[in-house]
Image (cartoon, rainbow, N blue to C red):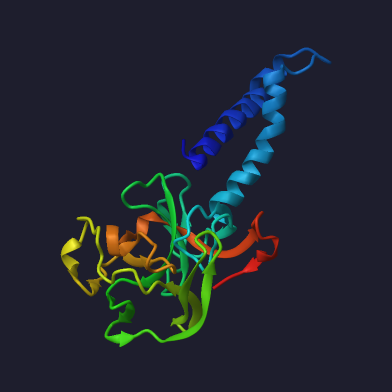
């Protein structure tokens, strides 16, 4: 079950019992008579669940990184915090935007509901916003005809695979972040699927070029050759956006990773 939905159900149950006791059951009890256990527990847990629900729905939500698609920025096992109001106030569970505050920008690390299975949360970097023409050919990113600046830095050693990969500083929206590229991986997209607005994209042996439709975003993993992203399954609609990732608060395997990231 979706955790947000589970939390909402608990909130409604405990809140309903608390309200029922305050309005009716409590008045029927005799003086000094104890509350039933189910009323006592509901009254105790309701304020705690309410605070957690409000914080998680409108302020920040914790996530755990499950895959290596965002290496070297985010590692498997990183626990991160996601700003839930950066892109607007949304109705919990339904994720319907109530108040617009901002929109995802190129370079943002964004959490969203996977378009093919909305019960799953994905995290990728936004590289294209509505109206952009995004090209990723020959393992080079171009946006609206302008090559995105990159600078090669020291190679990255994967501890899991014991393999070196080329690492670059890439600049989007004036901010730098790291990406990783493997020389022996093909440039073409081998497993692209049919998705909404598929006709906006052109695939060939050197990569893909897409025009981002209104209300959608083009996202990619920083681990460019080991990421299933918009190149494979298409654009992220605005109604799937969850929030902006901004802080690593724990990694049990690497305790020193506490802090913000780009």
* Front one among 90 and 112: 112
Q: Visible in this render: residue 101?
A: no
- Quarter that holds the C terminus: bottom right
Q: Visible in this render: residue 95?
A: yes
Residue 109: x %, y % from top left: 48, 67
Question: What residue sits 56% from the left and 62% below the top?
Answer: 159
Q: Is residue 32 left or right of residue 54?
A: right
Question: What residue sits 22% from the left and 57% below the top?
Answer: 196
Indicate whether 33 appears above or below 194: above
Q: Is residue 123 left or right of residue 57?
A: left
Residue 172: x %, y % from top left: 43, 80
Residue 203: x %, y % from top left: 19, 69
Question: What residue sits 47% from the left and 39% below the top?
Answer: 2
Q: Is residue 229 left or right of residue 31?
A: left
Outermost residue on the left side: it is: 199
Question: What residue sits 20% from the left and 72% below the top?
Answer: 205
Outermost residue on the right side: it is: 32
* Front one among 126 and 183: 183
């Amino acid at each position: 079950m979706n955790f947000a939905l589970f939390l909402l159900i608990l909130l409604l149950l405990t809140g309903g019992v608390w309200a029922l006791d305050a309005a009716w059951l409590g008045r029927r009890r005799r003086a000094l008579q104890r509350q039933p256990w189910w009323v006592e527990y509901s009254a105790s847990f309701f304020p705690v669940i309410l605070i957690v629900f409000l914080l998680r729905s409108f302020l920040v939500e914790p996530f755990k990184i499950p895959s290596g698609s965002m290496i070297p920025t985010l590692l498997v096992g990183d626990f991160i915090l996601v700003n839930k109001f950066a892109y607007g106030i949304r109705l919990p569970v339904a994720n319907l935007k109530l108040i617009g505050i901002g929109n995802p920008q190129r370079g943002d690390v964004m959490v969203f509901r996977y378009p093919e299975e909305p019960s799953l949360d994905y995290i990728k970097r936004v590289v294209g916003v509505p109206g952009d023409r995004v090209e990723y050919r020959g393992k080079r990113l171009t946006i609206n005809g302008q090559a995105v600046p990159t600078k090669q830095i020291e190679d990255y050693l994967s501890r899991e695979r014991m393999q070196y990969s080329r690492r670059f500083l890439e600049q989007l929206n004036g901010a730098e972040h790291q990406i990783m590229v493997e020389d022996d991986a093909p440039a073409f997209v081998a497993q692209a699927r049919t998705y909404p607005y598929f006709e906006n994209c052109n695939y060939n042996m050197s990569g893909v070029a897409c025009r981002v439709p209104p209300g959608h975003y083009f996202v990619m993993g920083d681990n460019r050759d080991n990421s299933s992203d918009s190149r494979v399954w298409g654009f992220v609609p605005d109604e799937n956006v969850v929030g902006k990732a901004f802080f690593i608060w724990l990694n049990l395997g690497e305790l020193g990773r506490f802090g913000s990231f780009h």
